[in-house]
Image (cartoon, coloured by chain):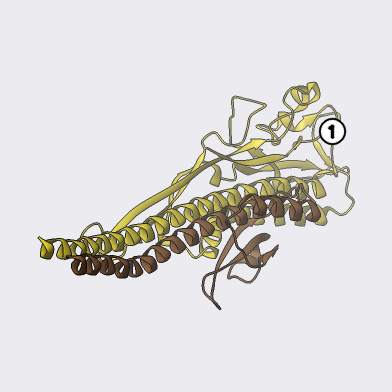
Chain colours: A yellow, B brown
């Protein structure tokens, strides 16, 4: 009896140490997993937010650059576009530069995701892009027939830009479909346990772009066009050419 | 009989000395991961404020400090906020980051950094 009680303490102590050891291992794995999940969620949110912000920047910048030459356009009584600018070549050059820069604006929207993800120490292979709704810049350039005051005319490529989203709604937000980005990582577990040795973790984020105006404002309701026009008719405001009306956007992460 | 009882008690007390490091290790590890998770959320908070373009530096600083105070378990090193340029490809963008060094052992630390593109409103 005495021998049994003596051995019982030792065996119980061994079992307790054994259990404690596995508890610590579990604790380490659990902590590592939760830290990884928190980090992945942060990275995927920041990557998507960066992409939306690049698109906002692109849309605003294109509108600004167009104004640098488009403000010199005028409508004559016949409804033709006439150039007020005495230096025709300058207008041509700025319009051409903007059109050439368009693929760059488009490419940066998606490329920034990879840079942000890599900056957080996550490889590109772990990145999952499920829906590309907001990766598209959503605009296209169009030629414009321009008349000179002395009677000549020219087709100006990249003369105006129209939006490709929501053709049926004038006061529309840019993203018809949200963007869904995810990160998939295989988290290695400590190898003292039989199974599993890895956990597959996926964290994702959904985001969209909104037209950042007060839709209840009567001026916006009357003049607004989602920031960009759908057609040439929407560019004309009385006797002025004003295609970009309040091109202000806001990227938001949806939960 | 008394002798044997005494041996069992001594074994139990001795075995406690084995458990203490195991428990201490487990506890410190749990606290470390908790701190790392909280540091991650603090860095995210700092980066979001910084890149929104709506807040002054002084306000961001005070908000980050207030948030840090609420995370009472956090023992942090220096919090660094600023532009993020020293990375391949980063110079094409306008990134900002918040970096937190979390002490691990005597001379080593875990660096937690959250990077994002600045809002055009900035």
Q: Disc 1: which chain?
A: A
Question: Within the image, what quadrant is residue B89 found in?
Answer: bottom right
Nearest the eye: A10 or A38: A10
Image vertical order of residue A209 relative to residue A87, above or below = above
Q: Looking at the image, which residue is at 59% across and 58% down?
A: B74
Horizontal side, residue B16 vs residue B119: left or right: left
Furthest residue in direction bottom, as rendered: B107
Question: Within the image, what quadrant is residue A115 found in?
Answer: bottom right
Image vertical order of residue A222 relative to residue A25, above or below = above
Q: Position of residue A198 (x, y in %)?
A: 30, 59
Nearest the eye: B62 or A105: B62
List the residue tagged with mark 1: A240
Does the rendering let one see residue B25?
A: yes
Q: Position of residue A136 (x, y in %)?
A: 55, 45
Horizontal side, residue B70 vs residue A94: left or right: left
Circle 1 SS class: strand
Question: Within the image, what quadrant is residue A219 found in?
Answer: top right
Image vertical order of residue A229 relative to residue A65, above or below = above
Image vertical order of residue B99 relative to residue A148, above or below = below
Q: Residues within 10 Å of mark 1 (few under 14, many from 20)?
A: some
Q: Position of residue A30 (x, y in %)?
A: 38, 55
Q: Looking at the image, which residue is at 79% across and 56% down?
A: B57
Does the rendering let one see residue B50?
A: no
Q: Looking at the image, which residue is at 33% across and 54% down?
A: A200
Nearest the eye: A248 or A204: A204
Horizontal side, residue A224 vs residue B3: left or right: right
């Amino acid at each position: 009896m005495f021998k049994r009680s003596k051995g019982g303490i030792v065996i119980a102590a061994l079992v307790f140490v054994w259990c404690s050891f596995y508890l610590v291992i579990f604790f380490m794995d659990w902590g590592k997993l939760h830290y990884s999940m928190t980090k992945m969620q942060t990275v995927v949110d920041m990557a998507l937010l960066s992409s939306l912000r690049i698109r906002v920047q692109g849309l605003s910048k294109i509108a600004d650059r167009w104004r640098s030459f488009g403000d010199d356009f005028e409508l004559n009584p016949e409804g033709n576009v006439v150039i007020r600018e005495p230096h025709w070549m300058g207008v041509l050059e700025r319009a051409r530069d903007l059109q050439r820069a368009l693929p760059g604006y488009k490419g940066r929207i998606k490329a920034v995701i990879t840079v942000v993800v890599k900056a957080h120490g996550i490889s590109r292979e772990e990145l999952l892009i499920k829906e590309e709704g907001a990766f598209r810049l959503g605009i296209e350039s169009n030629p414009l027939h321009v008349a000179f005051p002395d009677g000549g005319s020219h087709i100006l490529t990249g003369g105006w830009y129209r939006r490709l989203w929501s053709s049926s709604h004038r006061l529309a937000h840019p993203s018809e479909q949200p963007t869904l980005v995810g990160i998939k990582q295989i988290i290695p577990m400590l190898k003292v346990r039989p199974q599993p040795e890895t956990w597959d973790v996926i964290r994702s984020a959904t985001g969209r772009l909104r037209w950042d105006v007060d839709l209840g404002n009567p001026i916006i309701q009357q003049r607004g066009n989602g920031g960009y026009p759908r057609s040439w008719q929407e560019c004309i405001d009385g006797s002025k050419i004003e295609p970009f009306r309040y091109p202000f956007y806001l990227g938001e992460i949806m939960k | 009989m008394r002798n044997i009882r005494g041996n069992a008690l001594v074994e139990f007390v001795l075995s406690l000395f084995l458990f203490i490091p195991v428990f201490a290790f487990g506890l410190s590890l749990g606290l470390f991961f908790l701190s790392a998770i909280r540091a991650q959320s603090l860095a995210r908070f700092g980066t979001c404020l910084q890149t929104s373009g709506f807040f002054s530096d002084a306000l961001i600083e005070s908000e980050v400090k207030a948030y840090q105070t609420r995370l009472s378990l956090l023992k942090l090193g220096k919090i660094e906020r600023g532009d993020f340029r020293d990375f391949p490809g980063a110079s094409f963008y306008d990134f900002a980051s918040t970096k937190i060094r979390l002490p691990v052992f005597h001379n080593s630390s875990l660096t937690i950094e959250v990077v994002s593109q600045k809002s055009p409103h900035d």
